[in-house]
Amino acid sequence: MTTQSTATGTIRRPPAGLALRAPAVRIAKGHAGSGFLAAYPDYVTTARLDELRAAEYPYLDSRGHVYLDYAGAGLAADAQLRVHAGRMRGRCFGNPHSENPASRASTVLIEQARDAVLRYFNASADEYAVIFTPNATGACRLVGEAYPFWHQPRLVLTADNHNAVHGLREFARSHGAAVSYVRFSPADLRVTDTDISAALGRGALQHGESPGRNRRRGLFAYPAQSNFSGVQHPLAWVDQAQAAGWDVLLDAAAFVPTSRLDLGAVKPEFVTLSWYKMFGYPTGIGCLLARRDALARLRRPWFSGGTVWGASVQGGFHRLADDETAFEDGTVNFLSIPDVTNGLAWISGIGIDLIHRRVGYLTGWLLGCLARLKHGNGAPLVRLYGPADGEARGGTVAFNFLDPNGALVDERAVARDAGAAGISVRTGCFCNPGAWEQAFGLTGQVVRGTRWRAFPPPNVPTVDDYLKLIGLPIGGAVRVSLGLASDIRDVERFLDFAERTYRDQEPDGHELPPRLRCLRAGARVCFRS
C-alpha cells in the first residue's frame, strides 16, 4: 500500500490493480457466480476493495459477520484507528478556547479539519462555513431554531425525509409559518419534477418582484438520498428552488457515503451530514455546511460558551462571534474532530467513484435476485419498496418477506433470524415515517383515525397497540444497505439466508419482543444522528 501523510497522522492508501478474490456461498455453489460477473463484468475493476477489506476490515471475515447496515453506520478501517491512537499518544491536547500550547494544538487541528471538509466537497471558504455538530440531526436543529420563520415564510418538505428534517416543521409552526409536503409515487417512491415545480411555485412573491437573497419564499428541505428506499432525488432541484426564491436544506447524510457531492457545482444554502455514516469513526460528530450569506440570515435563540464575542451580566447584553463558531455550542469534540480529516483522506485515497461503482453493481444484483425469489407454489418471496432497478438510486434496499400465502413476515422475526445467522440488517421504518406510510399504503385518515380527538389516542400505550388499532399486520420493513467494504459474498450469503429461512416456510412468530416505542423492537432499530 502507498501512504498519504496528513496533519494528524499517516493513512495508508490501498493499492490499485489487485486480483479479484472468488466470492463464496452461492457463488461457490455455482448458484450465481458466472451470472453475476456476466451481468456486471466491470465489477472486476473494483477488485482493490477486496484487498482493502482483508487488510483494513479484518473483523468482518474473521468473525464471519455479514454487515448490511451501512445506512445505519459506516465501518472504521484499522488505519483510521491507528492514526487516532498515534495522535493521542504523541502530544497533549486541550480545550481549544484558550491560547495555551495544548489549546492551540487542538485549535490548529480543528481548523485543518474545516479546510479538509471544504476541499473534499469542492467548496470555497469564502462561500461556505463548516460548523461541527454532534450529528446531522444537530445540524438540522441549528437551522430550524434560527431560521426566520417569524417572518412567516413557507416550509416545504418532501414526505420522504428523515425525522431530523421532519422536525423542522415544529419550529416553523411555532412561529405561525405554513408547512406543506410534496407527496411521492407509491409505485417507486419517487417524487416527480412536476410535483416539485408545483410545490415550489406556491406562495409567489407579491407584485412580481424578484426574490433576491434578502427576501425568500421560505425553506425547501429534502434528502439527496432516501434512507428508506435508496432513491436519489435530483440535485437539480437545488438550482430550481433557488431560482424560484427558496433557501434549500439538503440532507446529504445517506448520500455522501457512496456518492460524490460537488458544492462547486450545486450550492444549497445548508447541507447536513454525519461523519460516521461516511467512514465509521468518529461517532458523535456531524456537520452543517452553510453558505455564509444564508448563515447571516439566521438568528440564534440563545448563546452559550464558545459562541460569543462577549457577554455581560451587569450590562445584560451578548454578542455572538463573527464566524462559524457562533453556532458551535460549548466545547467541540476536539479529540475526535481531527479524525474527520483522516476519514476524508481515507475515502479520497480509495476514491468515492470506485466505491460508488461497486455499490451500484452489488445493489443491482441484489435487487434482481430478490425480485426473482419465489416459493415453491410460484408466489413471490419478497415485496420490494422503491425502484426495482439501479437507476438513480443508492445502495439501500427496503422490502418485506412474504410467506407462501402472501402474508407479510414480521420484521422482528427477520431481525431475530438474521442476527442468529451473523447478519446485520435493520428493521422498522428507519425514522422515515413518510416513506414507510407510503410503502404500506397508509393514508392520513388511517393513521389519525376519524373519531380520535387526541393523537395518538390516550388508550394506546405501545406501538403494538397502535398497529392493531389501524389494522397493520407488522411494524415496518427490512433494510439492507451496502457500502465501502461490501462484496458479492455478503450479498450472496444474505440471499442464501433468505431462501433457506423463508422459502416455503411458515415463519416462527412466537416470543417476539414487543414494540414499545416508535419502530423499536426489543433493543435494536432506528437511530440516525
Image (cartoon, rainbow, N blue to C red):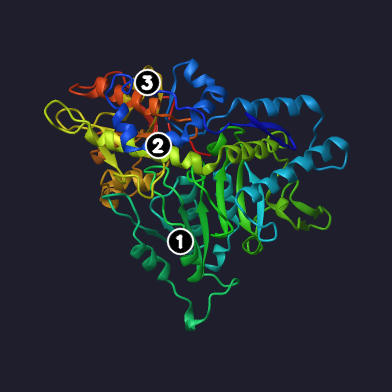
Mark 3 or mark 1, which has the lower sequence index?
Answer: 3
Q: Is residue 131 left or right of residue 237?
A: right
Q: Position of residue 99 (x, y in %)?
A: 87, 42
Tell whether 212 sits left or right of 200. right
For disc 1, the marked residue is 236
Rate crowding at label 2 as few (under 14), some (14 to 19) or many (20 or more) other CA atoms within 10 Å.
some
Residue picked out by circle 2 = 518
Residue drawn where x is 51% and y is 67% of the image: 242
Q: Which residue in the protein does label 3 denote?
A: 24
Depth check, front residue: 65 or 415: 65
* Tag 3 and tag 1, C-beta contact below 8 Å: no
Q: Nearer the viewer, mark 1 or mark 2?
A: 1
Q: Which residue is rendered at x = 47% and y = 31% of the image?
A: 47
Front residue of this view, candidates 336 and 5: 5
Q: Is residue 96 left or right of residue 63?
A: right
Residue 453 x, y percent position in the rendering: 32, 50
Q: In front: 448, or 44?
A: 44
Q: Amino acid at mark 1?
A: Ala
Q: Which one is in front, 200 or 516?
A: 200
Q: Is residue 39 above or below residue 114?
A: above
**Callout 2: helix, strand or loop?**
loop
Q: Element under label 3?
A: loop
Please provide percent x and percent y for residue 446.
26, 47
Q: Residue furthest left?
A: 377
Mark number for residue 411? none
**Amino acid type of the residue tagged 3 in the rendering:** Ala
**Residue type at the position of mark 2:** Cys
Q: Callout 1: few (<14), some (14-19), or many (20+) C-alpha neighbours within 10 Å?
A: few
- The crowd level at tag 3 (other Cα within 10 Å; few <14, some 14-19, many 20+) is some
Cα–Cα gap, marks 3 and 2: 37 Å
Q: Secondary structure at mark 1?
A: helix
Q: Quadrant of residue 295?
A: bottom right
